[in-house]
Amino acid sequence: MRRSLGLVLVVVGAFLTTLAPMIRFYVAGQVIQAPLNRYERVRLEASNASVFDMASLKVRKGMTLVADSTIRGDVKANGGNERIAVWDSSTSITDKSTGKQIDLQAFRMAFDRRTAQLVNCCAANVGGDVNVKMFGYGLLFPIADVHKRDYPFYDTTTRRTLPMKYSGEEDVAGMSTYKFVQQVPLAKVESMDVKLPGDMLGLGKNSVPQRVDRYFEAVNTQWVDPRTGIPVKQEQKITSSLRNRDGTGRLIVADADLVTIPEDQKHLADLSNTSAMEIAWTRIYGPVLALVVGLGLLGTGSAITLLSSRRVPPPPPAPRGPDGRFGGLAAGTPPNTRRRAHPPAGSARARRQPRRLGRT
């Protein structure tokens, strides 16, 4: 019984010991990836913002803007390719005091679920333009693999990939994060077929109307949990302006510093902590536990089996003799055995037999 138990422990221990590297190097790669079906809502606020009011043709200052961003995963858009996730993002920017919508932005990104790098497929677009080419990173940093270095990030407003530079470590919502900063230099984002009075562009009251285009510049900052690649806080310092063709005049139409509200920072931190624990169990705790338990069972089973094989077997029971007694054959002549007849003393046959020692 003990020998059978030892063999069972050895088999289970060998299985767990083999399972440990499989969990670390194979199962982890299958489990640690972005989900196909994702719903997430994040709100950013900007106090003391300035926005040009087209109705009054005046710049409104001291406004509080709210950027309400929603991400939804489209599980069928990848055409059955499970390595690709497709997420749609829409952002509505409103005046907090009146609830009036000021701007609406939308885009679709497709990316590798394991690396988070963008791919051009699945009707990825910015504002409905499917001709855009995206590369680098977009919505997420490398999944559970963030390092202290720069990453190329796609900016949907200027439609360019620009470096997101590592800028140190900071605590956000009770967790240690990596801070990354992306400088978006001034760029024309829209050609407009309109003219504005020269005095609105700062060219003087006597200047003639000027044809203008829309320009954009920004500083994007993200605080990322390096364990998961999830941004837990964002800041977008944006400036949108109208400029004439020779660049001598401009009108600031939007100037805001949008920051993730504290409530959503906490929500994102909780989400990242949950994901980090799942990743740790897959990469560290699970494999180590399987290895330790497996080795322990192997050692215990081997010891039980070895000790069982070395046990001295009990002596066999004494055989029963012909007379029914234990302990060997009974004294005397066995049954059915013919006794040997001795010749008479003094006969010729007796004289030929040798004398036995001890007899007279």
Image (tube, helix red, strand yellow):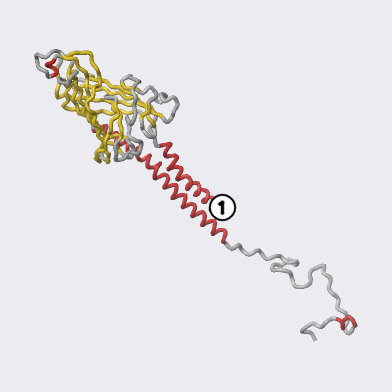
Which residue is the extreme one toward the front? 246
Residue 21 appears in the picture as rendered: yes
- In the rendered structure, the answer to whether residue 77 lies left or right of residue 348 reads left
| Mark 1: few/some/many CA within 10 Å (<14, 14-19, 20+) | few
Q: In this rendering, is residue 357 above or below 144?
A: below
Residue drawn at (16%, 26%) of the image: 48
Q: Position of residue 124 (x, y in %)?
A: 36, 23
Residue 260 appears in the picture as rendered: no
Q: Position of residue 266 (x, y in %)?
A: 27, 35
Identity of the amino acid at label 1? Ser
Q: Quadrant of the N terminus?
A: bottom right
Residue 17 vs residue 150, the one in the foreground: 150
Which residue is the extreme one toward the right? 348
Instruction: Look at mark 1 in the image and give the residue it sits on.
Output: 4
- In the rendered structure, the answer to whether residue 127 lies left or right of residue 26 reads left
Residue 275 vs residue 84, the one in the foreground: 84
Element type at mark 1: helix
Residue drawn at (25%, 34%) of the image: 181
Residue 89 picture quarter: top left
Residue 236 picture quarter: top left
Q: Position of residue 350 (x, y in %)?
A: 87, 82
Q: Position of residue 41 (x, y in %)?
A: 30, 28
Residue 261 vs residue 344, the one in the foreground: 261
Q: In this rendering, is residue 143 above or below 41?
A: below
Q: In this rendering, is residue 339 above or below 222?
A: below
Residue 273 vs residue 209, the one in the foreground: 209
